[in-house]
Image (spheres, grey):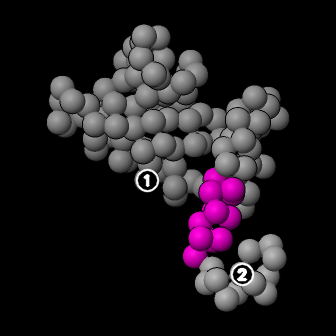
Amino acid sequence: MWIFLNDSSLSIVADRNNDRNLFVRGRAAGDIEKSFPDADVQYTPQFDYAYRASIPRGDVAAMIAQLVVQIDYDNFKSSISHDELPRHDAYLDMWCIMREFQQQQERAHIPRRLRKNNPDA
């Protein structure tokens, strides 16, 4: 699971060594600690994600639920601090890629008869 927050991004996967925990992984220093301040974060540059911590599943679920309840913005991209310009730009790149994916999916599912009448489809 990928989670993009306005101050961090996380990848959450199963911890193969402990069924009760999840690996919370990050690409930038400090991203994990922003959501899990007490986490024992390991620096692992030899892996795809340079930072990781094994955290109990319940703690991860509670953190995600708390973040959802605390949403107070109506535009995610605008909620990213101006101090986080590199993060904003990376997220904007991801937004553009996913918008293109959406458009490809829409084009693939528009019936042929409608495509003839709509050159943009």
List x then y, in percent, for residue 52. 40, 22
Asked which quadrant contains residue 100, the reply is bottom right
Q: Alpha-carbon neighbours of circle 1 within 10 Å: few (<14), some, or many (≥20)?
A: few
Main secondary structure found in the magenta portion: helix
Asked which quadrant contains residue 60, the reply is top left
List x then y, in percent, for residue 2. 48, 43
Mark 2 or mark 1, which is nearer the start of the sequence? Answer: 1
Residue 115's label in the rendered image is: 2
The amino acid type, in three-letter code, at marker 1 is Ala
Q: Which quadrant is home to the N terminus?
A: top left
- State whether residue 110 is above or below residue 55: below
What residue is shown at x 39% (from left), y 38% (from top)? 12
Between the residue at mark 1 and the residue at mark 2, the CA separation in whole angstroms equals: 42 Å
List x then y, in percent, for residue 102. 63, 62
Whether residue 99 appears in magenta in the rendering, the answer is yes
Q: Secondary structure at mark 2?
A: helix
First to last magenta residue range: 98-109
| Left-right relation of 54 to 93 | left
Q: Which quadrant is home to the C terminus?
A: bottom right
Whether residue 73 is visible: no
Q: Secondary structure at mark 1?
A: helix
What residue is shown at x 70% (from left), y 87% (from top)? 114
**Residue holding disc 1:** 65
- Nearer the observer, 11 or 40: 11
Whether residue 36 appears in magenta in the rendering, the answer is no
What residue is shown at x 48% (from left), y 17% (from top)? 50
The amino acid type, in three-letter code, at marker 2 is Arg
What residue is shown at x 51% (from left), y 44% (from top)? 3
